[in-house]
Image (cartoon, helix red, strand yellow):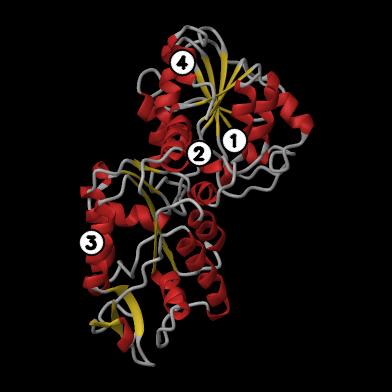
Amino acid sequence: MNFIRFSDLCANGSAKGKRVFIRADLNVPQDDAGHITEDTRVRASVPAIEMALKAGAAVMVTSHLGRPTEGEFKPADSLAPVAKRLGELLGHPFENGVPLVSNWVDGVSVEPGQVVLLENCRVNKGEKKNSDELARKLGALCDIFVHDAFGTSHRAEGTTYGIAQYAPVACAGPLLAAEMDAISKALANPKRPLAAIVAGSKVSTKLTILKSLASNVDQLIVGGGIANTFMLAAGLNIGKSLAEHDLVDEAKAVIALMKARGAEVPIPTDVVTAKTFSADAVAIVKPATDVDDDDLILDIGPETAAKLAAQLMTAGTIVWNGPVGVFEFAAFESGTKTIAHAIAESSAFSIAGGGDTLAAIAKYGIDKQVGYISTGGGAFLEVLEGKTLPAFEILAKRAAG
């Protein structure tokens, strides 16, 4: 994937004295009093900002926060808490907070060596629908546009796409560049065998992903409610487990796609069941052929987990999206734990994404052993679907001239 890297522009002096506009993802959770409760995204934005300041640029940063109404700014929409935290992270001379600028579309005053935070970009009229009028104004604000918000790269909005059309230079910041590199390594040019784990409660939300992957991967592992639907497709009884009976034919089609390529979708040979969905439910391991009508399947069994782990150990590349069982409950976490440790111990390049997946990675302490942890939920899923993200498309187009 060809694109301009902001790091290269800084290294060769092209950013010195230039107006640099960074689109970051600072959409952080806050409590009722407006205090940030989790600042990972703010911390992740710091390298691009520091890179720009060190290069001698005049730096503007913006982000969306929440779901504001365009043209109607409210105090709850303000990036003020972010400005304060960002200043603390940047340190002197910004420790008391990065200056926050409102009504900035028609012009921003900022000098080389300074950084300002531009108020919630989704308050601007035309942002969501990427109006051409707004896009041209945004492009005129800067000499270099830096997209560093992978979580928004599947949206063609004013500050993610429109500005990239009209800014003199459009490039990828360190966060976005790392995502683009990892995705290319995992999906465009993977080391084989390529294994994909797609799990979750519903086939319908990930059906296009499964179909797309079935034409590319060597091993397609399904888990959670998705696996239950595939068990139905294989003629097994799943009791009262979560599944989508109307999508059994679709699951059969995915199995057929894999089979035509000499590959398979492994169907669980044993499962962990319970009579109720609760943390204190009694867990029973049984063969997949012995599920009772009143059983709930809440995890894959140890035999299945061991087989899948062995498969993953032979992979060259692993893509992971979703836990294979109800790992939040101790009695039903064994399958996900086994898979997680297999990925950690594998010599394969691994890329993982999705909220529940990140929670599992944190729970089992394997973040240092996963090759790349994706920061964007919806964007990561769209990449797995085989879609070209708008941000990738426009940055590649600009790089090509």
Q: Which residue is mark 4?
A: 8
**Of the residues shown, which amino acid type is indicated by label 1?**
Ala
Label 3 residue SS? helix
Give the mark, 3 or 2, whose residue is nearer the N terminus.
2
Q: Nearer the viewer, mark 1 or mark 3?
A: 3
Q: Which residue is mark 3?
A: 338
Residue shown at the point (46%, 8%) measured from the top left: 12
Q: Is residue 91 left or right of residue 247?
A: left
Measuring from the top left, give residue 351's x and y in whole percent. 37, 45
Measuring from the top left, give residue 39's x and y in whole percent. 39, 42
Q: Front-most of 84 and 329?
A: 329
Q: Front-most of 10 and 382?
A: 382
Q: Which residue is mark 2?
A: 150
Q: Which residue is mark 1?
A: 391
Query: CA–CA distance between discs 4 and 1?
Result: 19 Å
Q: Front-most of 309 and 68?
A: 309
Placement of 126 over or under 138, stated as above or below: below
Marks 1/2 in contact by CB < 8 Å: the verdict is yes
**Of the residues shown, which amino acid type is indicated by label 3?**
Thr
**Of the residues shown, which amino acid type is indicated by label 4?**
Asp
Query: CA–CA distance between discs 1 and 2?
Result: 8 Å
Query: CA–CA distance between discs 1 and 3?
Result: 36 Å
Give the mark, 3 or 4, whose residue is nearer the N terminus.
4
Query: CA–CA distance between discs 3 and 4?
Result: 41 Å
Query: CA–CA distance between discs 4 and 2?
Result: 19 Å
Give the mark, 4 or 2, whose residue is nearer the N terminus.
4
